Amino acid sequence: MSPEHASANTGDVSPKELAARAAARLAELTGVEKHDVALVLGSGWAPAADLLGETIAEVPATEVPGFSLSGVPGHVGQLRSVRIAAADGAAPKHALILGSRTHYYEGKGVRAVAHGVRTAAAAGCSMVVLTNGCGGLNPDWAPGTPVLISDHINLTGDSPLEGATFVDLTDLYSSRLRAVCREVQPDLPEGVYAQFRGPHYETPAEVRMAGILGADLVGMSTALEAIAAREAGLEILGISLVTNLAAGISDQPLSHEEVLAEGKAAAQRVGSMLAEVVRKL
């Protein structure tokens, strides 16, 4: 299937039907009928995929209905199926790595932002791990610190839900899965993540506002995906990697190059942690 054919004629298809088509195409291309857990790997997290297990297949995002190449440096344009060996001799699990995240600020619409997690649910996943690189408001969290997301504040002014779709977001970021993380790394901190629209970085005043509202982390992804994942029935684990102190917390200017550099420096450590966590899920 050509990229043009894979992505054509999707405008009049419901999000659920498009996710079903994508899942069917993934099963065809990977040879894996059902995946168990999905991982959306944000800035700095891509190396974690290599530590999870044996890669069964890599699929260009443009070969799967509804997906497109990411327009953000540091995000790969592939979907990957990985076999994860179980430590207790049980049957291996299969992880679906969504490396082609669509950000809200790319202008492709909120349906495109939510398509990855909806596809994961259609592919059989029962849980999703959402990761990101973000700015931290806590000066004790040095760049390279992984932080569990306990809750979020959606500052995009949008929602992936359409019509009279009322979804309970209590314990959106699973307390059970956060407890599993602490089995691996007991000292992991946790905090509230605020998603801004982007693509510009937040001003110092906006960061102060987010802090007053209760945020500990600021970024440009994750919240909209988490809402869609909850509607789709997925259990959600969110992990941020603090790649820089947010504007006004530090007197240093912000840059995406810094985000990528800090992510690369921490990749082996946080990737190993995430791989161990996924094997326990």
Image (cartoon, helix red, strand yellow):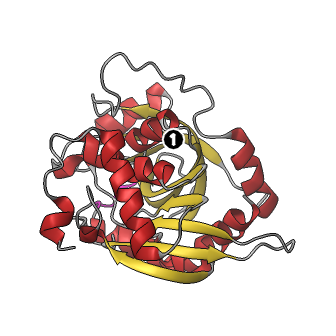
Residue at 42% over, 55% down: 134
Q: Residue at x 54, y 62 (%)?
A: 142
- As displayed, is residue 116 above or below residue 208? below
Residue density around tag 1, few if under 14, some if 14–19, many if 20 or more, within 10 Å: many
Q: Position of residue 103 (x, y in %)?
A: 28, 52
Residue carrying label 1: 216
The reply, left or right, for residue 174 in relation to residue 212 is: right
Query: Looking at the picture, does residue 49 appear above or below residue 146?
Result: below
Q: What secondary structure characterizes most of the magenta part?
A: loop
270 drawn magenta? no
Of 40 and 260, nearer the camera is 40
Q: Is residue 38 left or right of residue 58?
A: right
Residue 100: x percent and y percent? 33, 65
* Residue 12: percent from left, percent from top: 16, 40
Of the pair 254 and 194, the residue shown nearer to us: 194
* Residue 251 within the magenta-colored segment of the rendering: yes
Return the x and y of residue 244 as percentages of the image width and height. 42, 60
At x 38%, y 50%, the residue is 20
Give the camera-side residue of 266 and 138.
Answer: 266
Work out which quarter of the rendered image holds the N terminus and state it.
bottom left
Left or right of 24? Residue 103 is left
Amino acid at pointer 1: Asp
Q: Which residues are magenta?
A: 250-254
Q: Is residue 264 above or below residue 243?
A: below
Q: Is residue 217 visible?
A: yes
